Image: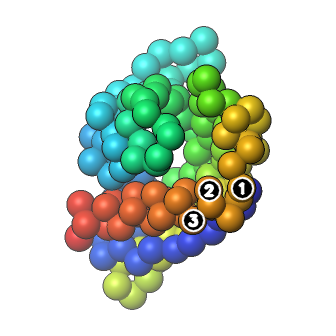
Amino acid sequence: MDIAGNQKIKAPREQVFQAILNPQVLKNSVPGCESAELVDTPIGKQLQLTVAPNFPGFKGPYTVQIRTGEVVAPSRVVLITEPSSSVGTIKAVCTVDLNEDSAGTDLKYNAHADMEGKIASIPEMMLKPAVKGALDHFFKSLEKQLS
C-alpha cells in the first residue's frame, strides 16, 4: 500500500524537522497515542509509542517502535516501523521531505506498507482511506502545534 500527501506548516523548516523527532510533539500528534518515549533497543534508540487506534476491529493499545533510516537535517527523515500483533505484521516506511516555503515549510510524505496476517485480508480500498486520514490528521496536528 502506498500513500502520499503534503502539509503546509507555518514554521521554519528546522523547527518542523526537530518536531518530527520529538516524543512529546509526536504524542500530541499521533491519533490515539497514549504515550511516547525514547527507549534503548539492541539496534539503538527508538521511539516507542503506545497507541489505541480508532479503527473498528483493532482494540489495542498497541506498542509501536519507530526508528529512523535516512536522516538529512533539516530536509529529510525516513521513519521505519514494523509492529506485530495478533492481527498481523506491518512493515512501513515513511519518507518525509521538508522544503522551505514563503509561508514556512512545505512538508511532503510518501509512505509504503507491506502487511501480513489478518490485517492483510482487509481490502485496500477500505484500509487506505483510514490510514491516509490518520496520516493527514497527524500532519495537521503537527502543524497546529508549530504554528
Residue type at tag 2: Leu
Against 8, residue 49 (above or below) is above
- Percent position of residue 75, x then y: 54, 62
Q: Which residue is mark 2?
A: 127
Residue at figure coordinates x 50%, y 40% from the top left: 57
- Percent position of residue 3, x then y: 65, 64
Dividing the image into 4 quarters, which one contains the N terminus?
A: bottom right
Q: Residue 129, labelled with which disc?
A: 3
The picture quadrant where one finds residue 13 is bottom left
Against 129, residue 34 (above or below) is above
Q: Secondary structure at mark 1?
A: loop
- Percent position of residue 137, x then y: 39, 63
The CA span between labels 3 and 2 is: 6 Å
Q: Secondary structure at mark 3?
A: helix
Q: Residue 123, labelled with which disc?
A: 1
Residue type at tag 3: Pro
Q: Residues within 10 Å of mark 1 (few under 14, many from 20)?
A: few
Residue type at tag 1: Pro
Which residue in the rendered view is the most extreme toward the front?
57
Q: Residue 77, labelled with which disc?
A: none
Nearest the viewer among 101 and 143 is 143
